Structure formats: C-alpha cells, structure tokens
Amino acid sequence: MSAHPRLSLNQATIKYAPFDEALRLTAGAGYESIGLWREPVADVGLAEAARRLNDSGLRISSLCRGGFFTLPEGPERRAAIDENRRAIEETRVLAAAGADGSAAVLVLVAGGIPAGTTDLAGSRERVRDAIGELAAEARAAGVTLAIEPLHPMYASDRAVVSTLDQALDIALQFGPEVGVVVDTFHIWWDPQVFAAIERAGAAGRIASYQVCDWATPLPADVLLARHYPGDGVIDFSALTRAVDATGYAGDIEVEIFNETIWDDAWPTVVARTASSFADVVAPHLSVLTT
C-alpha cells in the first residue's frame, strides 16, 4: 500500500538508519518524498548523496538544518554564517537531484541566547541580520530559507523565535526567498496560530508543513518529546485545514524525535508514520498531490 502522495518522511524519524537504508525504506513503503538532514548527507558526501537520492526516485521536501544565528559579531558568528552558505549550496544540489517536485527548502533554527547573557531581544535582531546577509545568496541559488519557530521551552538554548508571527515578521522583511515552517509540535499552543497561518499563507511564505504530536508528561530531555500524529493532544484537523485553506500544496513532513520510536524497527516506524498520517492528517487535505 502506498503512502499518501503528500507525505514526506523526515529522516530524523528513523534517525539511526544509514542514508541508503533511509532512502530504501522510504521509497519501498510507497512514499514519494523524504526530508533530509545535513549530517547523514555529509557522512556519504554531497555528490554521492545527490546521486543516491536521484537513484531512489524520491523527491526532497527539505534539508535540515541551518541557522544558529544569535552569536555576537566575531569569528564564531562568521563561521556560523559561512556554514549556512554551505547549507544553501547543499540544498540547491539535493533539490536538483531529487525527483520532480523537489523543494529547495533549507530549514533554519534560530539559535538560543548566547551563553552568559540574557540578551533575548538582541539575539532576535541578530537572527534577522544573519538572514539579511544570506537572502540574496539563497535567491540566486533558488533556495528558500525557512524559519522554524520552536516552542518557547527551547528559547534559551535552541530558538529565540518562538511563534509563527515572530518568524513571519522576520521573513516579510525580505523577498519570497525567506519563508516559514509550520510545525504542529511547536505552534499548536499559540492562541494566535490560526491568524498567523492565514497571514503566512496570504503572503505566500509557508515553505514547509511538519506534523507530529505533543503528549505529557514530557521526558527529561524535552527535545525527544515528539509522538506520532494522533498519539497526543494536537488538533490536526483544525491546523491542517487552516494550512490547506491557504493553498499550500507542498509535501507534509512527519518529523519525530523520540528515543523509543528511534529504537523501534525502522520498517515498523515507516509504516506507523504512514498509517498515523492517513488517519489524522490526510482526511483534512483538499489538495492530494504536490
């Protein structure tokens, strides 16, 4: 049985699977798309990863991740921005290698507050400034820089951009080469989220829709708190319909960080991801194909 044509398996969902195995399992289960991560790509080399992606017949929905822009000016900040330049090029190469409909989307995680400071406002300004440095290069490469707001519990160490509106406020200072990620895990709690989704859609800035669920109690490592869609409290009907109503017709990634799921058999995870998507996300989509 084929997976839904708009479902993409984010590679992090089967984190421990080698690059080739991730491609094989995803294509073999009838998925048409995969979201890749830079580290597994680096393990095999960019050119080789592009070749293998092309051979798999899969399109790419996004590349994770760039960002981490909050350091003050200095050698470390310069190194971070240069690393994002490399990530833009990787995104371009992989999108060109993927099957028709591949998205040249580089997901950006803003970065947390620099150690030893409490400079939240300045950190957000430095995120905007870094994107300003990279926007023209992304545009020239045909790559969309997709700012992903993360739940506020990650603001100190991982992402000072916490709401969809904050991400969109940055994106709208630039051209269409800068967009936003709508990730249900991170934005489901926000009372302004539906207005923000409508605003992002009206501006044509939704670059990616990612889905997974939220359930309590949270684990000690809150990074690993994600669940299959339908196993928690998120209203996928309302959120998916809101995204769908904007006309977003791209791939929809299931991205799960969960140690129990990572330790499960990879074919089981791939199958369960497809079935959970079919049960709680797909029924609310009006556009069936990319």
Image (cartoon, helix red, strand yellow):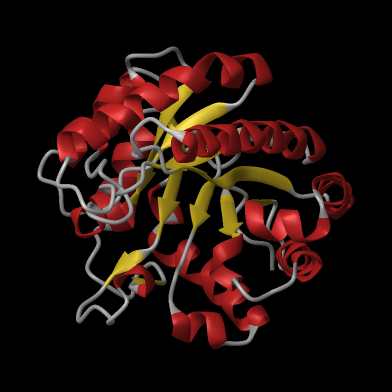
Q: Position of residue 188 (x, y in %)?
A: 22, 53
Residue at x-position 72% and y-position 62%: 30
Q: In this rendered view, identify the residue nearer to me: 136 or 255.
A: 136
Residue at x-position 17% and y-position 40%: 119
Locate residue 33 relative to residue 107 in the image: left or right: right
State the quadrant of the C terminus.
top right
* Residue 37 in view here: no
Instruction: Tell me: residue 17, above or below residue 241.
Output: below
Q: From this viewpoint, which residue is outermost toward the front?
A: 74
* Residue 130 in view here: yes
Residue at x-position 54% and y-position 80%: 262
Q: Position of residue 39 (x, y in %)?
A: 65, 58
Residue at x-position 56% and y-position 87%: 264
State the quadrant of the N terminus.
bottom right
Quarter holding residue 62:
top right
Q: Position of residue 11 (x, y in %)?
A: 61, 61
Quarter holding residue 124:
top left
Instruction: Tell me: residue 145, above or below residue 64.
Output: above
Q: In this rendered view, identify the residue nearer to me: 79 or 89.
A: 79
Locate residue 230 relative to residue 95 in the image: left or right: left
Locate residue 217 relative to residue 76 in the image: left or right: left
Q: Position of residue 96 (x, y in %)?
A: 78, 32
Instruction: Tell me: residue 290, above or below residue 34.
Output: above
Q: In this rendered view, identify the residue nearer to me: 39 or 79.
A: 79
Q: In this rendered view, identify the residue nearer to me: 246 or 16.
A: 16
Instruction: Tell me: residue 202, above or below residue 13.
Output: above
